[in-house]
Image: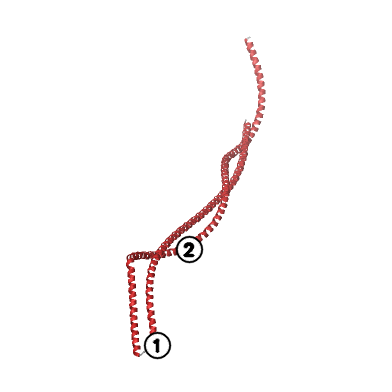
Amino acid sequence: IQLEAKIKELTERAEDEEEMNAELTAKKRKLEDECSELKKDIDDLELTLAKVEKEKHATENKVKNLTEEMAALDETIAKLTKEKKALQEAHQQTLDDLQTEEDKVNTLTKAKTKLEQQVDDLEGSLEQEKKLRMDLERAKRKLEGDLKLANDSIMDLENDKQQLDEKLKKKDFEISQIQSKTEDEQALGMQLQKKIKELQASARIEELEEEIEAERTSRAKAEKHRADLSRELEEISERLEEAGGATAAQIDMNKKREAEFQKMRRDLEEATLQHEATAAALRKKHADSTAELGEQIDNLQRVKQKLEKEKSELKMEIDDLASNTESVSKAKANLEKMCRSLEDQLSEIKSKEEEQQRTINDISAQRARLQTESGEYSRQVEEKDALISQLSRGKQAFTQQIEELKRHLEEEIK
């Protein structure tokens, strides 16, 4: 049973193996067919592989070229990115500079407005100063005219002063002489008064004695003349008597001589009276001279005081004129200095305004240039961005192509 079972089992196994063999034979034929097909496919694959190898080399070259192009693109992108960053930084710097310049422009505009206001104020002040200057010029011309007149007056006063000084010197000399003379006359007057006092008693006696002596002398002369006439008359009478009588001519001569004698006698009396009158007149004249000298001394003192007062007043007037002249000169110098200062301030303000205007123009030009550069930078940045985007898309396309080629190659290799 066991053998039968084993034979049966072996038979079943043989049948199974025959079936398997048949299946294997079928599979073999199928495999042979498949092998033929595979050989054919291998031949095709070898052809395809050769083609693929060729394409692979071409693709590898293409990939290499693409890789190099991608590396170049990466470098270009990095360079463009760097340039973009630099452009962005330059653009930002330009914007900052533009903002700074705009701030400067705003500041300068405010300063310009302020300066324009100051210029307007200064122009108003200048107009007022011009008006004041015109008034001052008129006042200056008037003062110059007054100064000229004052100078002329001063010159006249100087001349008058010189003349007055000369007159004063002359008057001082005259006054000194008069004072000396007055002092001498006062001394003489005092001496005369003293002598008059001393000789009040004796002077009249001496004068009377002198008059009496003169009268005696005159009388003696008259007596002598009369005696001479008497002798002459006696001689004539004796001669007449001796001649025996007098003629009419001799009588007339005698009468004439008698008349002359009487006349001489009257003359003697008149001379005596005249001498007394002359002495009285001399005494009166001396008293009048003394009084007149005293009055002249008083008048000279008054004249001297008046001249000294006039001299002091003239000195005060000259000092006042000199002070006024100095004040006018100082006022003129101050006005000229003020005018020059205002002109300098106006010129300085105009210069500052022109300089600020030039600065504003320069800043405006710089601002326009910066705006132009900013626009150019923006355009360049946009172009770089577009180029980077384009290169990135190209890189992405190349990458996709490489991936597809690799995948296709791998699929073909499989």
| Secondary structure of residue under mark 2 | helix
- State which mark lies toward you, 1 or 2: 1
* Picture disc at residue 53: none
Which class describes the residues within 10 Å of circle 2: few (<14), some (14-19), or many (20+)? some
Quarter occupied by the N terminus: top right
Residue 81 drawn at (x, y percent): 58, 39
- Please give the residue where the numbered disc 2 appears in the rendered image: 156
- Report if residue 403 is visible in the image: yes
Give the secondary structure at mark 1: helix
Give how far across and how far down residue 198 sits, in percent: 32, 65
Mark 1 residue type: Ala
Which quadrant of the structure image shows residue 295? bottom left
Which of marks 2 and 1 precedes in the sequence?
A: 2
Q: Residue furthest top?
A: 1
Residue 275 place in picture, x, y as percent = 37, 73
Q: Which residue is mark 1?
A: 249
Q: On the picture, is 66 further left or further right than 175? A: right
Q: Is residue 54 visible?
A: no
What residue lies at 55% left-to-right and 55% top-to-bottom?
Answer: 135
User: What kind of residue is marked 2?
Assistant: Asp
Check whether the beta carbons of the residues at disc 1 and disc 2 lie within 8 A of each other: no
